[in-house]
């Protein structure tokens, strides 16, 4: 995925969060029987200037400059109902599922604070909760912002012809949860993604296509897709909100105070 940019005076950090994890596993269960005959071989693209220009066109349609100015975002991930808050300035995430809340440093997933029902977890239980929350964030955030991540470290871009049009093949060679995955972006006339095809390790068939639609524009100007359809399966991202700074989304006390206390010397 693409650079996770710091904003303002913050440092710049990167993620290579590749896997589609739980959502893709659900797609696999739903689609394998129905779509096994549509298994597509992984294509071989042509790298070069045309691929980079198409990547530029897609990022321009998404207003990637506005995404760089988006310092905080929150959303609810449809299949699980997991609620996410991402402070991009510090690169910290809050992951809530039921009565479990985890604050995790996305650049050091061994570092975090986990509570259940307001009671802080410790030892192996805390470590598992923090690790699992990080993996959940990896999955859920990829469905949110994958188009912005086509120039992550470890990616290659190439052109594949699909029905007479150029499509952008992005391959992830390293990092994240499932390195080696590939995604073929199918773009509309203005460069906005309309769908992708996936060759991922958690799917037993190749080239499953899911839509990217339900586009909204955040107050910062960045564009986010909130709906993905793959056959009978629909993934919805709800309550999507973004702002230039965390305080605009969560006024009042710092929601990451417990994690901040852990990082103080």
Image (tube, helix red, strand yellow):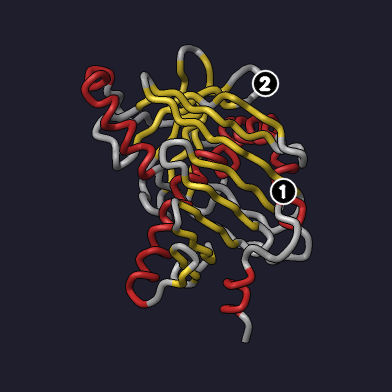
Q: Which residue is mark 2?
A: 190
Report if residue 175 is visible in the image: no
In front: 25, or 198? 25
Q: Is residue 69 left or right of residue 50?
A: right
Mark 1 secondary-structure assignment:
loop
- Report if the CB atoms under discs 2 and 1 are less than 8 Å apart: no
Sooner in the amino-acid sequence: mark 2 or mark 1: 1
Percent across and percent down for residue 255 are 64, 63
**Which residue is drawn at the image coordinates 63% and 27% (left, top)?**
215
Gap in angstroms between the C-alphas marked 2 and 1: 23 Å
Q: Residue reaching furthest bottom? A: 265
Position of residue 117 in the picture relative to residue 59 (left or right): left
Residue 115 shows in the view: yes
Tag 2, which secondary structure? Answer: loop
Q: Residues within 10 Å of mark 1 (few under 14, many from 20)?
A: many
Is 78 placed above or below 165 here?
below
Where residue 4 sits in the image (x, y, percent)?
61, 54
User: Residue 58, position in %: x, y?
Assistant: 63, 31
Viewer-side label of 2, 1: 1
Q: How many marks?
A: 2
Q: Position of residue 56 (x, y in %)?
A: 66, 35
Q: Is residue 201 left or right of residue 114?
A: left
Disc assigned to residue 70? 1
């Amino acid at each position: 995925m693409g650079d996770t940019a710091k904003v303002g005076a913050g440092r710049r950090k990167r993620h290579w969060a590749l896997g589609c994890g739980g959502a893709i596993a659900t797609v696999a269960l739903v689609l394998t029987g129905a779509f096994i005959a549509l298994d597509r071989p992984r294509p071989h693209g042509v790298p070069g200037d045309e691929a980079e220009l198409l990547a530029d066109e897609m990022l321009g349609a998404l207003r990637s400059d506005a995404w760089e100015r988006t310092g905080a975002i929150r959303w609810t991930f449809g299949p699980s109902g997991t609620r996410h808050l991402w402070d991009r300035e510090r690169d910290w995430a809050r992951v809530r599922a039921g009565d479990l809340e985890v604050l995790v440093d996305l650049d050091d997933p061994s570092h975090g604070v986990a509570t259940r029902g307001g009671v802080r977890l410790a030892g192996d239980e805390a470590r598992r909760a923090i690790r699992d929350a990080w993996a959940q964030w990896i999955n859920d955030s990829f469905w949110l912002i994958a188009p912005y991540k086509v120039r992550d470290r470890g990616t290659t871009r190439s052109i594949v012809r699909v029905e007479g049009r150029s499509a952008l093949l992005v391959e992830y060679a390293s990092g994240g949860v499932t390195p080696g995955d590939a995604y073929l972006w199918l773009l509309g006339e203005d460069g906005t993604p309309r769908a992708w095809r996936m060759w991922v390790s958690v799917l037993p068939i190749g080239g499953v296509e899911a839509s990217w639609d339900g586009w909204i524009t955040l107050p910062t100007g960045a564009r986010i897709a909130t709906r993905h359809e793959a056959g009978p399966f629909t993934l919805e991202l709800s309550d999507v909100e973004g702002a230039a700074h965390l305080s605009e989304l969560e006024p009042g006390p710092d929601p990451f105070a417990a994690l901040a206390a852990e990082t103080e010397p």
